[in-house]
Amino acid sequence: MICARDRPAVVGPVRFAAGCRTRTRFGSGGVHELMGGLGLDAGARVFSPRDNEQVSRQPQAATPPAASEFRERAVACLQAGDWRGAHSWAKGWVGSGGGSHIEPWLIYVASALLSGKARDAVHAIDLAIGLWLPGKHDRAALLWLRGCVVHRRLNDPRTALLDLLPAEPALPPWLTDQREAEIAACEEAAQHSRKRVPSVKPAWSYSGRPESLRLPQQADEPRSDGEAPDAQLVKVLVDLGLPVA
């Protein structure tokens, strides 16, 4: 299987800490702590696929995959139920310059949900909308999905509305068909919810990526703000219970 064998190998001083929920804003040494949730160090370098023994023995000489390969491999892992493989390809994509794309963040969300860690999905979304995604429609899409995760996986519809309602006006076309039904269902559930303590803290607001965090750009590709993600990735999200189609 490509998922178990061909996960991207780490090149250079990159450290990944799965599940870390540090929310430290950047300051003195803060960039390193800030990216701890995804394992991206400020000194991060290129990721490469472990496609054969030669690449494994000499990772420094490896050429990183293009965005299309990161996407293909990550989605294949999700379809195979390999959340670890999907997580590895997503972090490789971000570390190779794809952090301004919504798709690696959707893969992070899917891999976290597949592993049963809804709060890790929320944390990945916070990093994306706080630091990485410059487009308001992409950020609205992830804020919407944050609300859906909080509602459907954490059973906290009141807190979910704090994400769904602000996100609704800027939702991209690929999500607009679901907005009215999801908000109505969440409002109905909120009337009967007994939760009084929010399951998660408020979503991050956008501040932009720290200038000191410099990554390669080999896996960057042109895309429009609000552009629909890969259809197979959307299907994975639907299969995980998210209202995206």
Image (spheres, rainbow, N blue to C red):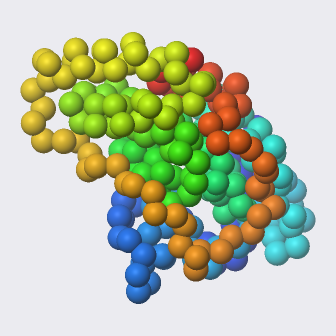
User: Which of the pair 43/188 is nearer the observer?
Assistant: 188
Question: Is residue 92 among what the camera can see?
Answer: no
Which residue is found at the position 46% from the left and 47% from the top?
125
Q: Is residue 243 above or below residue 80?
A: above
* Residue plotted at (75% across, 69% down): 216
Query: Is 40 on the left or on the right of 68, as rendered?
Result: left
Judge by depth and name the residue closer to the eye, 131 or 71: 131
The answer to whether residue 82 is left or right of residue 191 is right
Q: Position of residue 107 (x, y in %)?
A: 59, 41
The picture quadrant where one finds residue 72 is top right
Residue farthest along the bottom direction in this orientation: 28
**Residue 92: which quarter of the image?**
bottom right
Q: Position of residue 207 (x, y in %)?
A: 46, 63
Residue 7, compared with residue 75, is above or below; it is below
Task: Inspect this view and state whether residue 62 appears.
Answer: yes
The relative height of residue 193 versus residue 84 in the rendered view (above or below) is above
Residue 228 x/y as whole percent: 67, 31
Q: Residue shown at 47%/24% (left/top)?
A: 242
Of residues 137 and 189, the one nearer the viewer is 137
For the C terminus, give its image quadrant: top right
Q: Quadrant of the N terminus?
A: top right
Relative placement, left or right, of 110 versus 150 is: right
Q: Residue at x 69, y 66 (%)?
A: 10
The number of discs equals 0
Q: Is 178 on the left or on the right of 218, as rendered?
A: left
